[in-house]
Image (cartoon, rainbow, N blue to C red):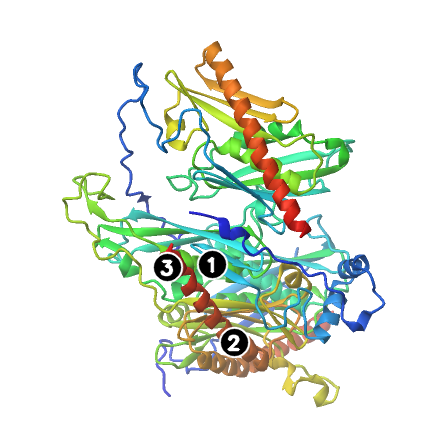
Amino acid sequence: MAAKPGSAPVTYSPNLGQKTRPPIFKDNDLDWVRPDGRGFHQCRPAFFRTGAVNSASGSAYAELGSTKVIVSVFGPRESKKAMMYSDTGRLNCNVSYTTFATPVRGQGSDHKEFSSMLLKALEGAIMLETFPKTTVDVFALVLESGGSDLPVVISCASLALADAGIMMYDLVAAVSVSCLGKNLVIDPVLEEESYQDGSLMLTCMPSRYEVTQLTFTGEWSTPDINEAMQLCLDACSKLGKVMRTCLKEAASASQE
Amino acid sequence: MCFFPLFRSKENRLTMGLPNASGDLSTEVEVDAFRRLFPLRFYEKHLLESIRPDARPLGRARETTIALALAKIGSTTMLAAIKMEVMTPSLETPDEGCIAIDFHMPPICSPIVRPGRPAEGAPVVAKQLSDTILSSGMINLKELSLVSGKAAWMAYLDIYCLDADGALFDTALLSAVAAFSHLEIPVVSLNDDGKIVLSEEQGLSDREPVNKEKRKINLSSVPFSLTCVLHKNYILADPTAEEESIMDTIVTVVLDSSSQLVSLHKPGGTVLAYTSAIQDCIALTRQRVKELQKILEEGISGMEVD
Amino acid sequence: MEVDREDGRSQNQLRPLACSRNILHRAHGSASWSQGDTKVLAAVYGPKAGTKKNENPEKACIEVIWKPKTGQIGKPEKEYEMILKRTLESICILTVNPNTTTSIIVQVVNDDGALLPSAINAACMALVDAGIPMKHLAVAICCCVAKSGYVILDPTKLEEQKMKAFAYLVFPNSVRSVLPEGSLRVEGEPIENGIITSVTHGIMSVDDYFYCLERGRAASVKLSDFLRRNLQQQSTDSSKAG
C-alpha cells in the first residue's frame, strides 16, 4: 500500500476535532431539529435502481441521503465449498465497506455481523427449494456510510435478488428506529446513531405483512417498542412501494 | 456525490447474427451455444469480417464516461477516492508529501471474486497503477508539503472496481486521474499542539493557514493508457473480459500528454509482438489519448457548471 | 559515445554470466543463474496432478512462487510472479501434459539489479533441466535509459536507481533449424525479434524504447549463445558420467 516500500508513516486526519455538540434531549428539548432537518418520523428520500453491475446476475444500487450501497447477486451457481447434497438452495451473504465509506479511513470493516444479519433477513423471503444443490451469492459494498447502513443494504439486496430473477415470496424492506432520550427517530443518520440510547431494526415483507427479522439494542420500554415497531411497519410498506415502482420501471424500460 | 451516471450508458449487448460465413446458424440460441462452445472460432469468424461481437471495429474503444471520480469504459466501472491525511515527512525528503495507491476488487464486481480471498489480479494492477502514477510525474510531491520537515500530506488513493469487464487498468487509471483533477485540499493551520487541523472547524480562522495557495494539485503530463489484445495479426483495442480470456496476449501502452512513453507492458502471452505490432499499439494509444483528454476535460467542465 | 560505468564496463557489455543446472536433488529440475552479483535459484516441481484450483482439462498449469531474499512477499513480488508465470506459459508447450501443475520456485539469493530478467533466465534453465516440453527458450535482458538518452545494458542496482527509465525485455532464443531460412520468419522478421514480455518503468520517448529493443535484441543473441553452450556442455558432461 505504501508508495515507498519499507516506510509506513503514521498519519492522522486533520479533522480530528469531533464537533462537540451540546448534550441533546433534555426532557423539554422537543424543538430539537435533526441534522438534516427532517421530522422525527420522516424517512430520507429513497433512490433505488436495478442493473448497476453488468457482470452480475442481478444487482441494485440504493441511495438514501448519504448512505450509498451496491449489491450484486451471483447465481444460482455451483456451491464453492464442497458440502453435502441439499434439497434446498443455499444463500451466501457478504457485506463490505470501502476504505472511504466512513469519516475515518478504513474503519468500516468492523461490521462482521452484518453479513450474517443480511443472510437471516433475506433467508425467510427466498424460495430456496427452487434452486436445489446450488448457491446464490449476495455481495454488498457500502460506498458511503451515512447511517442506517444495514437496513439499506437489506432492502437493496432484495431488489438485486429480484433483478437476478431469484424466486421470492415478497420483497424485503428494512427500516431502523433510534431511541434518543424520550424521542424515537426513524431512519437515523450516522450522527444520530452515534448518540442513540437504543436502536431497533425491523425487516419485513410488506405485501404479506410478515416480519423476517427484528433486532433491538440498548434500553427500551415496552410502549416505546410498540410504537417503534408500528413506525417501522408503516415505513416498510411505503419503502416497499418505492422498491416495487423501481422494479416496474426497469421492466418496462427493458421491454421498449 | 451522486452516482447517477452509473446507469447512463447501460451497455446494449448486441446479439448480432454472425456474418455470412456461418449462415447455417439461424437462431440466436444456436449462436449463443456456438459462442460458448467454440469461443475462439466464434471470434475468428468475426475478425475475418473486421468486426467484434459487440459491433465495434477492431481498433475502437468502448463508450467512455467520467463523472467526478467515477470512470466507465463499456461496462467496466471504477470509483476512486482520495483521502488526505497528515504525516511527518521522511528525513531524506523533508519537502515532499506521499501518495499511497491501492486497488480493490470487492466481490460485487465479478463472479470470479469471492469474499475473504483477494482477487488474483488486484495486487498486480495496484502495483502497475502505483508505478505509472508515481513515475509519470503527474503530481509533484513537493506540492503536497505543508511545513517543511514537520508536516506533509499523505494522499490515500483508493480505487474500487464496481464492475469488471476487461481493461481494468485503463479504467482504474482514468478514474485516478479524474479523482486527482477534482481534488480540493482543505485549508489547514497549525494548532498549539503542533498538529495540523482544519482551519474552520477549530476556530482558528484568524490564524494564518499553512496552505493558502495550495488548494488544487497541478497535474502536469497526465498519463492515459490503452490495452490491446493481440491475436494472430489482429489487434483489438480495449478488450472486454471475454476477449481477454479467449485471446491471452495483452499489451498495455501508457503515454502521457506529451506523447512520452510511461509504460509498455506485455506480460507473456502466446503471440510474439514484433516491431510493427508494437508500433500499431502505440499509434492506437496516441489516438486514444486524444479521445480521453477530451472526455476528461468535458467531465471536469461539466461538473463546474453544476 | 563513451559512457563511464562504475565497474568499467562498456555500454553494451553484460556482467559475467554463470549458470549451473541440477544443483538440487529433491526438485525435478533446478538451476542457479548469476549475472555479476545478482544471483537467483530456481527449482521446478512437476508436472504433478493438478490441484483443484488450477485444474484445466485442456492445458497444463504453471505456478510460480517467488521467495524474496528477506521478508514477506508484497505487491512487487506478486507482479513478478504474474509476469514470470505468463512468460513461462508462453514458451512451454502446455497441451502435452493437460490437467497437471508445474510449480516453479524462484529464490532470490542476491539482488544487484536486473532481478526479474535473471529470474526469468534461471526459471527457463530449470525448466530445461526438468525436461518440461518447450517451444523455445526465453532470453531476458534489462536495458536502462539515462537522462542524456544513452542506453546501457544489464545495470547494477546502483545504475538502475540512477537512470530515468528501464525496460525488461524477453525474447525467444535464436533458433537453429534444418528448415529453410524463410520458414522461421514472421512478416519478414526472424522469430527471435518478437517480444515475449516487455515491462518498463519510468518515462522515455517512444524512440528510446525502440532503441532499447534494438540493443536488447543484439544482446539477447549473445545470451542465447551462452545458454546454448551451457546446455550442450552440461549434457555432454552427464553423458560421459553416465
Q: Are the residues tagged 1 and 3 within 8 Å (C-beta)?
A: no
Q: Nearer the viewer, residue A227 or C27?
A: A227
Q: Position of residue A207 (x, y in %)?
A: 64, 27
> Crowding at label 3, few (<14), some or many (≥20) Cα neighbours within 10 Å?
some
| Cβ atoms at labels 1 and 2 below 8 Å apart | no
CA distance for labels 1 and 3:
12 Å
Q: Mark 3 highlights which residue?
A: B181
Q: Which residue is mark 2?
A: B282
- Mark 3 belongs to which subunit? B
Output the chain of dot 2: B
Q: Nearer the viewer, mark 1 or mark 3?
A: 1
Circles 3 and 2: CB atoms closer than 8 Å: no
Pointer 3 and pointer 2 on the same chain:
yes
Q: Is residue A212 visible?
A: yes
Give the SS element for disc 1.
strand
User: Which mark sits nearer the N-terminus, 3 or 2?
Assistant: 3
N-terminal of the pair, mark 1 or mark 2, is 1
Q: Dot 2 surroundings within 10 Å: few (below 14), some, or many (20 or more)?
A: many
| Quarter where residue B31 is shown | bottom right
Return the x and y of residue A79 as percentages of the image width and height: 71, 40
- Secondary element at tag 2: helix
Residue farthest along the top direction in this orientation: A222
Amino acid identity at mark 2: Ile
